[in-house]
Image: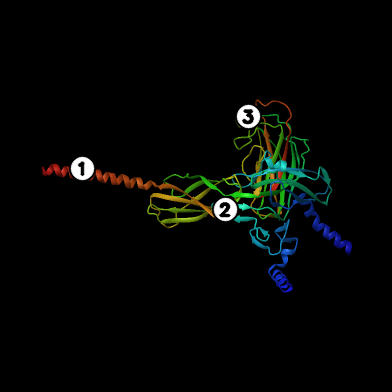
Amino acid sequence: MKKFLIIILLGILAPTLSARAFSLSPLKYIFSVDAGETVSADLILNNYESSGVDLEPVVVGMKADENGRPIFDNSAEVVAWAKPDWNFFTLKEGVEKKVKFFITVPIGTYPGDYYLGVGARRAADNKNAVSIGAQVLTVVNLKVAGQAREDLSVNKFDNVSSFYNKDKKLVWEIKNNGNVEMPISAVLKIYDWRGRLVNENATNVGNKILPLASRVGEADFSPEAGKFFWPGRYQANLTVDYGLTKQQITTVKYFWYLPGWIWFVKGAVIVLIIIGIFIVRKNKHAIK
Amino acid sequence: MRYWLAIFLATVLVVAPAHSLRAAMSSTDYYIYADDFSVGGGLSSGGSYSLQDTVGQSPTDISTGGSYALHSGYQYQTLGSISLSISDSSLSLGTLTSTGASSTAATTATITTDSATGYVLSISNVSGTSLAAVSDGAVDGDGSSEEYGVAASGSDAAFGTDQAVTSSLALASNAGAVSGGSATILTFKAVRGAASEAGSKSQSITLSAVANF
């Protein structure tokens, strides 16, 4: 009976084990440190494959792309800060192993947030047209003690849709000019020529922005369904709330809405004016 | 003296939360440990992690004017794991004999993670030699030129056209956990051009999986 149960359990677990390959934990570390201090990032590697996997330590610099996703920067100074306490080894199937990375922040490092990835890599075998290696990383955020400065700018806020289209698309770009990551949120408000609020909606700018990183995106505006949208000049306000210091910045962009039918109206008005002037002059001549 | 000492100890034991005396606290999402812990500190929580502050000091002292003081001595982990498996790590594109006919080879990269912020699968390293990188979104030998690139497909695929194989190219991503695994099929494509030089090309690529910030 016991053997039967063991076989059933193995049958349930085996697909899970082989599907997960090799894994790394934890997902992230955050250290707040003084310049000159050394910290240790302890990681756990697991091999779920059916054979041993050859692994080597890896350290990469990290930053965010314009969509807020992590990308690699191997020229970053932080790469030299981290040293593994292990070298190449073979992690046998079904085995768990703990490894360390010692990270020393140099004396004199400027305060603020720094990012690197530490983990393990299975190298490509270089045997074919395309050889593929794999690596998994833990994100390490080093917060170097000192003065944190929060500063955000809106570098772009433009209307890219045509003036005759009432559905507007506004593109924006914001940049973190400070030395620490900041939580961010934004709201887009639309006002008509009389200053009345026409629309207000939260704009997705992401949850946070890393230091010296830019973020780009779009904010769409469409008039309320069933409501007449008057032609004319409108004002778009993009307000971004950012930082632990609860700062706010607002950028304004004006746009026009001039649908096709307005040109007929304008043309008709001009024609009527001309006819009116002609009639008045004709009457004046008649009186004389 | 004894009287005042007794009052002091009683006050301390009443005010100090019991958990601040433990070396570590944990939850399903996070694990906190501090280099030093003092009686009287407490937990403040929010988002995906909690922060323990020591007596009289917090990790940040907020002030006006857009700046604050950042203190040292705090460490957090975001618990969870991330794994990457590749179905075929060695792909052959064969021999390209005629122009206009592309050769393809595919592999499947599967990410499994319980990261609440999701993951990104990207190319972290590229080395070796290859044909000219695709620039028009399609490896089809248009105009009798050689082209080489990669296509991604799957629910988390980052793009829908053929892209040049370059470092930091995001192949797939998800904003949430994929505990059951998310598979992305990567199809490498190559087509020779009329002016392509004969010879062998071999490229090594490293795929990298990491949790989103």
Q: Amino acid at mark 3?
A: Ser
**Which of label 2 and label 3 is nearer to you?**
2
Crowd rating for badge 3 (residues with CA inside 10 Å; few <14, some 14–19, many 20+): some
**Chain to which mark 1 belongs:** A
Who is closer to the viewer here, A93 or B134?
A93
Q: In this rendering, does residue B186 appear at all?
A: no
Same chain for marks 2 and 3? no
**Chain to which mark 2 belongs:** A
Q: Which quadrant of the figure contains the N terminus of chain A?
A: bottom right
| Residue at the spot of label 3 | B145
Q: Are marks 2 and 3 in contact (CB under 8 Å)?
A: no
A222 sits left or right of A180 in the view: left
Crowd rating for badge 2 (residues with CA inside 10 Å; few <14, some 14–19, many 20+): many
Residue B122: give x, y in percent of width and height.
68, 43
**Chain to which mark 3 belongs:** B
Residue placed furthest toward the front? B1
| Residue at the spot of label 2 | A243
Gap between marks 3 and 1 measured at Cα: 68 Å
Total marks drawn? 3
* SS at badge 1: helix
Same chain for marks 3 and 1? no
Q: Which quadrant of the figure contains the C terminus of chain A?
A: top left
| Residue at the spot of label 1 | A278
Residue placed furthest toward the left? A288
